[in-house]
Image (tube, helix red, strand yellow):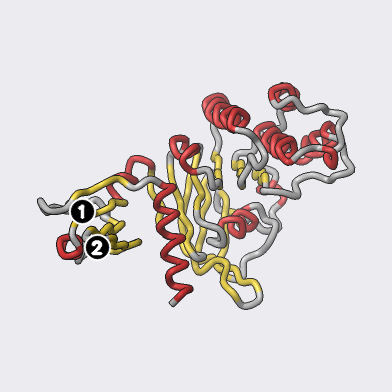
Amino acid sequence: MKIDVSNVSKLYKQKHALKNISFTIEGPKIIGFLGHNGAGKTTFLNLLAGLISTNEGQICVNGENVFNAPVILRDICFVAESGNFQEDMTVAQSLKTNSFFYPKWDGQLANELLQVFALNPKDKVRNLSKGMVSALGIITGFASNASITIFDEPYIGLDAAARNTFYDLLIEQQIENPRLFLLSTHLIDEASKLFEEILILHEGELLLQKTAEEWEKYIVAVKGSPQDVELAIKNLEVIYKHSFMQEMTAVVFASGQAIEDENITLENVSLQDLLVYLSKQQKARLVK
């Protein structure tokens, strides 16, 4: 599957949730779709799932615009953070309803995963805990067998053991039934090793798109005295800069460029740390 995003913008009450973003992703692959709160992630995922329309630009899957395209949308499963199921339905009824929509639905897998997550098919959705509702969403996503399967914060309320079960299932499913998985999560340290490609949105714009292999060469923390750091990064784009006592830390886009100076040190930057830096940068701008 190939997703082409071309000059997409989305406004809410004249405020941009997405600003002219363009990129292409192809599967099968597990992609981390990341950004701090308000970055535009969920807006984009709703657009990709055909639930809302763009103000400008278009999103195409295999060359066809996703909005008002039932054939394409049947091959896209979007498990949102909440609101996936009708509360007056039972677990079994919810899965049965979804089975009618997704032509490649795997009923056997759904039943197996009910046991894995200890869900009672006869329980009504309204009586489930948050973790149980999340588990039902996970089951739906995997059982859909949709070529594009989207999980937006899929494990709210699940404990560490259940989250690890989700990660194991994600790897298992990608081996047995490869597809394009998009995973949006705030638990980045836990999930980062799963990602084969990373997209980060920041304030409605695409900040970067890199494979996992490219990451370490692209984002670097430069540490040293303020004078030495400023000299080392003078031709680089700075993401975040902070000074404490006599030491400065600058997180930069290195783009594979060598940064050499005997008076500085270079460190890798985790995905989690980068999002923290971006959030601090945003707050600093709001204070000004």
The answer to whether residue 177 is visible is no
Does residue 140 appear left or right of residue 34 in this picture? right
**Outermost residue to the left:** 262
* Residue 202 percent across, percent down from the top left: 47, 61
Q: Is residue 115 above or below residue 217?
A: above
Give the residue pinned by disc 2.
236
> Mark 2 packing: few (<14 Cα in 10 Å), some, or many (20+)?
some
Label 1, secondary structure: give it: loop
Q: Report if the CB atoms under discs 1 and 2 are less than 8 Å apart.
A: yes
In-front residue for pair 42/155: 155
Of the 4 image quadrants, the one containing the C terminus is bottom left
In-front residue for pair 76/192: 192
Q: CA distance from mark 1 to mark 2?
A: 9 Å
Give the residue pinned by disc 1.
257
> Residue type at mark 2?
Leu
* Residue 118 percent across, percent down from the top left: 74, 25
> Residue type at mark 1?
Gln
Point out which mark residue 162 bears. Answer: none
In-front residue for pair 180/273: 273
Label 2, secondary structure: give it: loop
